[in-house]
Amino acid sequence: MIKLDVRKLIGFGKGSFIVSMPKSWVEKNNLKKGDLISLNDDGVELVLSASQEAKKLDSREIGIDAQGKDLEVLKAEIVSSYLNVFDTINILFENNSKDVTRIKDILRNLSGLEIMEQTSTRIVAKNLINIAEISTSNIVRRMDIITRAMMEDSMLCCRGNCNYESIHSRDVDVNRLYFLGYRVIKNAIKNPRIAKALETDAWKLHSDNQMIVKIETVADRQKRIARYICTADLDRATLEDLEKIYSQISDSYNEVMKSYYNKDKEAAIKIEVTNKDRTSACDRLLENYTNSHLSLKSKIANSNLVAVAKIVENLKATCVEIRNVARIVLCYE
């Protein structure tokens, strides 16, 4: 049930009337006394909206003390500050710290952040991207394109043409886009002006957020699959079986993304229904490999068995995310 907020009309002078504005709406739109309100009179309804004149939002700044902190902890703090839409990140560290290069690498992997100042004890990074000009739909497409390339390269690993460094680099690119997408979506949810500038709404933002999470997860799984294939010493027959299953999963990923772009519910239903076939094929691969190699008692044989189990685990996880994308499509009206 929709709850209407009823306000009393108050006379003001001889020719005007006034009505009070909800405080929550004023604060959400970052308005203050004296700001302009746009009115659209269609004869039946009077629609009020925050003026679309350019209004610079307050810049947010945060300081991070890196002294004595583990690098992974520091990375989590920097990424968290970026995702929480801080525009300036000041990082303080010990004089000529050995972690400076790593800290700069972390900052460079966050889209829009540029190092504006660096001394022997301080790095200042500022965001130079206008969030209101970033399309979340474009971010989804770019992440999708990179992930498809990762799948293709990972399948090449089954033929002995593995370039894991390239796959890992592409995963970094996907992560960078994921962080940017999260930052844009969070900003748009909190600020209706940005959402309006992006010509989006709450449901679209929710859908885009779900998509960047799913695609980032799929990309991460491909990186792990490639790593295990590269490090294991698998026989030709196993690699051929693996490539066949992998190809089917890759095709299903391409199909579900096509259904997403076209809002094709019938195609999404087909992906949902056939998902168990792909996961069952993965289970059979692991079962067959285990039965045929169980009698081998060498350290290498055990290591290969673990690798195949990990590969199957990540293939099945990829199938789960493909199914989840299909369910996003099914939620479209």
Image: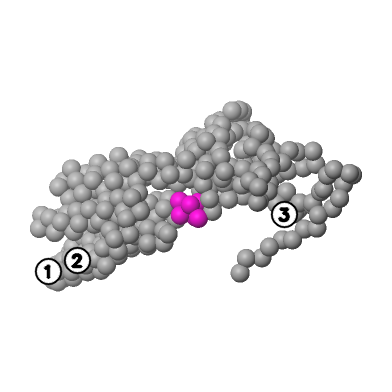
Q: Quadrant of the C terminus?
A: bottom left
128 vs 216, left or right, is: right
Q: Which residues are magenta?
A: 203-208
Q: Residue drawn 83% across and 44% down?
A: 16
* Mark 2, residue position: 281
Q: Quadrant of the N terminus?
A: bottom right
Check the image and name the residue furthest to the right.
13
Q: Are marks 3 and 2 in contact (CB under 8 Å)?
A: no
Q: Earlier in the sequence, mark 3 or mark 2?
A: 3
Q: Residue drawn 34% across and 46% down?
A: 144
Which numbered marker is on residue 24?
Answer: 3
Q: Which residue type does callout 1 highlight?
A: Ser
**Residue 314 is at least partly visible in this image:** no
Helix, strand or loop at disc 3?
helix
* Mark 1, residue position: 292
179 vs 270, left or right, is: right
Check the image and name the residue furthest to the front.
43
